[in-house]
DNA sequence: GCTGTGGACTAGAACGTTCTAGGGTGTCGA
DNA sequence: TCGACACCCTAGAACGTTCTAGTCCACAGC
C-alpha cells in the first residue's frame, strides 16, 4: 500500500498558501476574484506540492463533466484515424474525450454502459451493430452522435461520409479511363454498403451503362474480396469498384494469381484510403473519407446538442475524395 | 439544455422504494445487510427508473477508483490487439480500464496527465518515447507498468516480449531449412530493436555462423524495409530476419520487383504477427508475441502493486512463438 | 460623518455516493 | 423477565471540489 503518501488536495494547497479553500479554487480555475500577488503565491505552492485537481470531485460538484464519450472498435483501422481527429476537435471545443473500446470479447452495450456511468455529456458512436431503437433509448438520456452509420431518428444525429458520392467518383474515374464493363463488389450487411451499391448503380445509369451493371456479393474481409474475384473470373469485367480496401486487397490477390494484370487487364478501386491501400506493393486507387471533417462535424453536433443551440439538419454528410494510385488505368481495347 | 430531465440519483430510488439512501446503496452494491424482499424491491425500482450509479461520486467517497489507466498509440496496430487482452484481464481482476490515446498531435505527456486527473490507481504504458527518468517521476505517484519497452528502475514494472528469444527462433527456423547466409534488418532506435539484433547475432554464433552475421540498418516503416532490400540486392543473402512485419513487407516488395523469388531465392521472417502478415498475398512467416499473456501479466503486476502484494521479479518476459507461413523455405543450393 | 461601491477574501452548503456508528425489533436460552 | 445476539435498517459524516452568499475593508462622494 502506498497509503502513506496521501493525495494532495486543494485544502493542502490552501493551508500552505495561507488562504481559504474557496480562494485556492478560484486561483486554480483562473476565475476572477483573486489578487495578483495571492494568485501567484497559490500557483507556486500548488506547483511545489505537485497538486493535481481531482476531476471526479470537480465534475461532481459542477454538475457538468465536459466529457464526451467515444465508442470505437479496436479491430477497425479507420476508427483510429478518426480518434486522432476527434481529440483535436474536442480539445478545441473545450471538451475532454473518454474512450470505451469494443473488442471481440467486449460488446457495444458494455462499452456504452461504462460511458454512461462516467457521466459524459454526449456519446459519439463509431459504426456498430446497434439497432436504431436501441440508439433511441440511449438518446433519450443524452445526445448521441452516430458516425458512419445511418439512423432515421429525430433524436439521433448522424455524421457520415457520402457513400453514394464516393461510388459515383469511382465510376466516373473509371469511365473517364474508357471503362464500360464495370462491376461492383458489395459489402454485405454493413453500414454504408447499400449506399455504395446504389451509388454505383446510379452512376452506371447516368453514364448510360445500365446493361453493364453487375453487383457481386461480398463483405468487409479480405476473403470476401477473394471469393468475389473467383466469381468474376469466369467473365471478367475491365474494372471493379470494391466495398472497401481490405476486400479489394483480397480481390487483387486472386486476380493476379490467375494471370490477370492490374491495371492492364482490369482496374480496381477500393474505399476508405486505409494505410493498407498506401502500401507500396498494393498502391490501391481508392476513395478517401475526409477524416478531419468527419471528426470536426461530429464534435460540433455533440456540443450543439449539449449546449442547446438550435440544431441544423440532423444528418451531416461529408463528401469523399478520389485518390488515384496504380490499380487503375486505361481500359483494354 | 436537457436540464429538465434531471439525473436519477440513489436518493430518488430510495424514496421511491421507501428506504433510506444508505440501504439503497447497500442493495446496489450487493453488500450484505439488506433483507431479500427489500433487496428485490429496491432493484426493481432502480431498474424501472433507469438508475445508473454515478461513478464519480462513488469513487470520490470510496477513495479507490478501481481504475487502471492505459496509454496506447492509435497508429500502432499491435496496441489494439493488446487492448483486447487488457480489457479481459482487468475485468477478471475487478478493475475498469480508462483509455488515453497518443495521436500524431497528442503526446504521451498529455495522455498521461489526463489519466492522473482521472485518479486511476495505476498506469499501463504501451511502448512510448518517455525517458526512464520521466517514468520514475510518475512512478513516485502511482504504480507504473511499462509494456514493450525497458526501464531499469526498481519502481517501474516492465512486461515485454522476449525479443532476443524471438530472434533465436527466427534464426533457428532458417538454419533448420539449410540457410547459412542470414542477414538481419535492424529496427533503428525503437524499443526492442537492440534486443532483436543481439538475439540474431547470438543465434548466428551459436550455430557457428559468425562470419555470415550481417546487420543492415532499417526502421519500423515499410520504406525502411524497402531501403534495406536495395542495400541487400548487391549481394543477396539466402534469408533475412526483419525487425517487424511492416518493414518486412517493404523488403518483400523490393526483392520481388527485382526478380528475386520468395522463398525460392530468399526467405523472409518478420516480427509481431500483425494482421498485415496474415494477408493472403503477403502470408509472412513471423514471430508472434503472446498478446493475451502480455496483457494478463501486465494487469497482474499493476494489481499486485496497487494491493501491496510482495512483488516478484520486476521484469516479466514472455516467450514469443514462431508462425511459419509461406515466405520461408529451403535454402537454394 | 454617513452611505455606497467594489475588490479581496471566506464560511459553509452542495454534488451523489459510501462508510461508520448506531437504533429498533424479534428470537432464544436462562 | 431479562440479557444476548442476530438481523434489518437509518442518520449523518465524509470524499474534494465548486458555488452562493456573504464579510471585511478601503476609498469615494455627499
Image (cartoon, coloured by chain):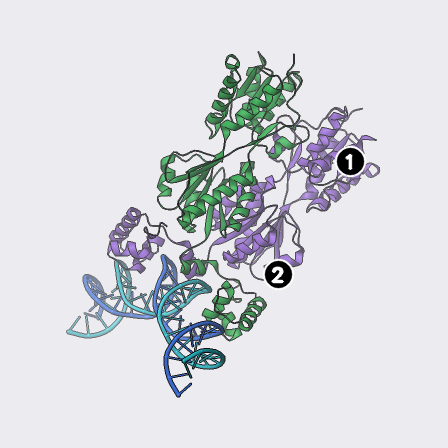
Chain colours: A purple, B green, C cyan, D blue
- Residue at the spot of label 1: A183
Q: Give the residue at mark 2.
A: A137
**Which numbered disc, 1 or 2, marks the residue that appears first in the sequence?**
2
Would you say residue B9 is visible in this rendering? no
Q: Position of residue A111 (x, y in %)?
A: 57, 52
Of marks 1 and 2, the one in the foreground: 2
- Horizontal side of residue B318 vs A253, given as left or right: left
Give the mark count: 2
- Tell me how far mark 1 sits from mark 2, CA to CA: 40 Å
- Determine which of the numbered discs, if any, sits on residue B75 in the image: none
In the shown orientation, is residue A257 left or right of residue D20? right
Q: Quadrant of residue B76?
A: top right
Name the image quarter holding residue A35: bottom left
Q: Chain of mark 1?
A: A
Q: Is residue B33 visible?
A: yes
- Secondary structure beneath dot 2 equals helix
Q: Position of residue A276 (x, y in %)?
A: 62, 33
Q: Position of residue A252 (x, y in %)?
A: 71, 30
Label 2: how many Cα within 10 Å (few below 14, some 14–19, many 20+): few
Residue shown at the point (48%, 25%) measured from the top left: B188
Vertical side of A154 occupied by A125: above or below: above
User: In the structure shown, which secondary structural element does the residue marked by tag 1 occupy?
Assistant: strand
Q: Who's the residue at 82% across and 36% down the image?
A: A212
Residue nearest the viewer, comparing B265 with B253: B265
Amino acid at each position: 500500500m502506498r497509503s502513506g503518501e496521501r493525495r494532495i488536495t486543494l485544502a493542502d494547497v490552501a493551508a500552505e498558501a495561507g488562504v481559504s479553500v474557496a480562494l485556492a479554487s478560484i486561483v486554480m480555475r483562473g476565475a476572477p476574484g483573486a489578487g495578483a500577488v495571492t494568485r501567484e503565491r497559490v500557483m507556486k505552492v500548488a506547483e511545489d506540492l505537485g497538486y493535481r485537481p481531482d476531476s471526479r470531485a470537480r465534475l461532481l460538484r459542477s454538475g457538468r463533466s465536459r466529457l464526451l464519450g467515444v465508442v470505437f472498435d479496436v479491430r477497425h483501422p479507420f476508427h483510429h484515424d478518426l480518434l486522432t481527429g476527434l481529440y483535436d476537435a474536442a480539445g478545441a471545443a473545450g471538451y475532454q474525450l473518454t474512450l470505451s473500446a469494443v473488442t471481440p470479447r467486449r460488446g457495444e452495450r458494455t462499452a456504452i454502459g461504462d460511458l454512461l456511468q462516467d457521466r459524459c455529456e454526449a456519446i459519439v458512436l463509431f459504426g456498430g451493430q446497434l439497432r436504431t431503437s436501441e440508439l433511441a433509448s440511449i438518446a433519450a438520456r443524452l445526445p448521441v452522435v452516430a458516425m458512419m452509420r445511418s439512423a432515421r431518428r429525430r433524436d439521433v444525429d448522424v455524421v457520415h461520409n457520402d457513400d453514394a458520392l464516393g461510388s459515383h467518383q469511382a465510376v466516373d474515374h473509371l469511365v473517364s479511363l474508357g471503362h464500360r464493363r464495370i462491376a461492383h463488389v458489395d459489402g454485405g450487411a454493413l453500414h454504408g454498403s447499400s449506399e455504395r451499391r446504389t451509388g454505383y448503380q446510379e452512376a452506371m445509369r447516368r453514364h448510360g451503362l445500365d446493361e453493364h451493371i453487375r453487383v457481386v456479393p461480398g463483405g468487409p474481409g479480405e476473403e470476401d474480396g477473394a471469393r468475389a474475384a473467383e466469381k468474376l473470373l469466369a467473365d471478367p469485367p475491365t474494372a471493379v469498384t470494391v466495398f472497401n480496401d481490405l476486400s479489394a486487397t483480397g480481390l487483387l490477390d486472386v486476380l493476379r494469381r490467375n494471370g490477370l494484370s492490374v491495371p492492364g487487364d482490369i482496374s480496381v478501386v477500393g474505399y476508405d484510403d486505409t494505410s493498407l491501400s498506401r502500401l507500396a506493393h498494393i498502391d490501391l486507387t481508392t476513395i478517401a473519407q475526409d477524416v478531419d471533417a468527419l471528426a470536426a462535424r461530429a464534435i460540433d453536433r455533440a456540443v450543439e446538442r449539449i449546449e442547446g443551440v438550435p440544431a441544423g439538419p440532423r444528418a451531416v454528410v461529408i463528401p469523399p475524395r478520389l485518390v488515384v494510385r496504380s490499380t487503375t488505368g486505361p481500359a483494354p481495347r
